[in-house]
Image (spheres, rainbow, N blue to C red):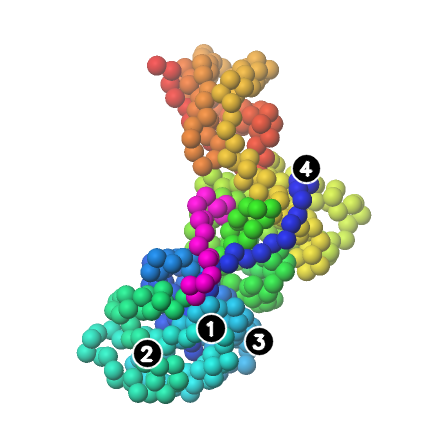
Amino acid sequence: MFNLKLVMLSVKQLPLVVVVGRPNVGKSALFNRLIGRKKAIVDKTPGVTRDRIYEQTEIGGRSILLVDTGGLAAPDSDPLARATEQQALQAIEKADLILFVTDARAGALAGDFVVADLLRRAKAPVLLVANKVDSESKKGYFTDELIALGFGEPFEVSALHGLGIKDLEKAIADSLPRTLDYETSHANVPRIAIVGRQNAGKSSLLNAILGDERVIVSDKPGTTRDPVDTEIEFAGTSVVLVDTAGIKQKSHVQDPLEGLGILKAFQTIDRADCVLLVVDLTVGVTDQDKEICGRSLEVGKSVVVVYNKIDTVKSSNSIDTYLWDLHMESFHFAKHCPYIGISAKTGENVHKVIPTALEVVERRSMRLPTAKLNAVVRDALTKLLPPVTKGRRLKVSYVVQAYAPYPTIVLFVNDPELLPTSYQRYLESQIRESFGLFGTPIKFVLRPKR
């Protein structure tokens, strides 16, 4: 059904402006200030940002890809801290411009000099930023110390209050390479959110799709906290993939930062066109998986269920039969949603994920011919009469599709209260079968005939 030709994927090329520095100097606060909204989590706890966080924005009339990174030179031997630093170093290698953020109130500390040594080997130009200058009277306290880092006089700013940001934005625009034409339009780009419980393999799936260690993969639950955007091209179509924090029940959330990451995951679902629900087959389908799927459909999102770790399945049946039985039993309320069995670890069937998601996105935006839509509903009413309620039966005089982000059907009826939920599901299945609307919810709007 989804036998689409797979082509090479490539990350969209915009000028890459990377925000780096030691932990807790305000990198994420500056990132949020420059993009104009709170995307990266900001907290006084060092090491909050772990993955590279990408966001397209416009500065000084130039479209750029701004990248927030985890802290460099952290005094931590934890493997996760080392992986975080490796992510930042990869971003530095690909950067067109680097914003080296320091704490103006602390001056140049030993960690700043370690970062400075790393950046001297970078190919991209570096702008030194002294953050946390919260008033004009506090300017210049540690200017001499910061100049000693070797990147000229710092731009003194307050990411929190916005002081000095205009001068910094002008410097960013002036420092970008003019010989490269990166400008591109991103209107109507499908957004595909990768969601699921903690440690289900969401980041591994994204890395397997991209063929790049784009996000940190760890056995430790809760590794991804911020939604991570990656724009790719598939068969000439731009697609934004968003990796999210693992979702778990509120009663099990103890860390406030973890809870904020989960909240951002739900916000990402609200902004997505399609949700890739990653299910860990070593654990099986849980109530949390069903809740994520149900909530996604309720807010009008298309869903593809991705059963990860099929390399671990041991069953007397074939893997296809096993997955069919599991899907029909676990997601009986969403049987129209397609599913794929994959192994992000071995790469098995990963190439099917994007074609399936794009097929679903295409179906959700279909325009249904009004004449055929009315014929389908008339046939459904003839095959199975609506039930009689209080001596009256539902009559449908006309059907039309409304303009909406996903299929929305307006029924003009004699009395909206005469359509029970069970019969509405029947009409939905008839319309879905006739037009091939798999993977996407269908909304009914009832209007009394005037």
Tag 3: amino acid: Pro
- Alpha carbon distance from label 2 to label 1: 17 Å
Task: Give the quadrant of residue 213.
Answer: bottom right
Q: Label 1 is placed on what type of residue?
A: Ala
Q: Which residue is mark 4?
A: 1
Point out residue 176 in the picture as x, y percentages from the top left corner.
41, 66
Disc 3 secondary structure class = helix
Q: Circle 2: is it few (<14), some (14-19), or many (20+) Cα within 10 Å?
A: many
The answer, for residue 377, to whether it is visible in the render is no
Structural distance between the alpha carbons of marks 1 and 3 = 28 Å
Residue 79's disc is: 3
- The answer to which image quadrant residue 392 occupies is top left
**Badge nearest the viewer, 1 or 3:** 1
Magenta range: 177-191
Label 4 amino acid? Met
Q: Is residue 180 magenta?
A: yes
User: Do the numbered discs 2 and 1 sit on residues whose CB atoms are within 8 Å?
Assistant: no
Which residue of the protein is positioned furthest toward the top in this rendering?
Answer: 391
- Count all numbered tags in the image, as a single digit: 4
Residue 370 place in picture, x, y as percent: 49, 20
Q: Nearer the viewer, residue 144 or 427?
A: 144
Comes first in the chain, label 2 or label 1: 1
| Residue highlighted by disc 2 | 154
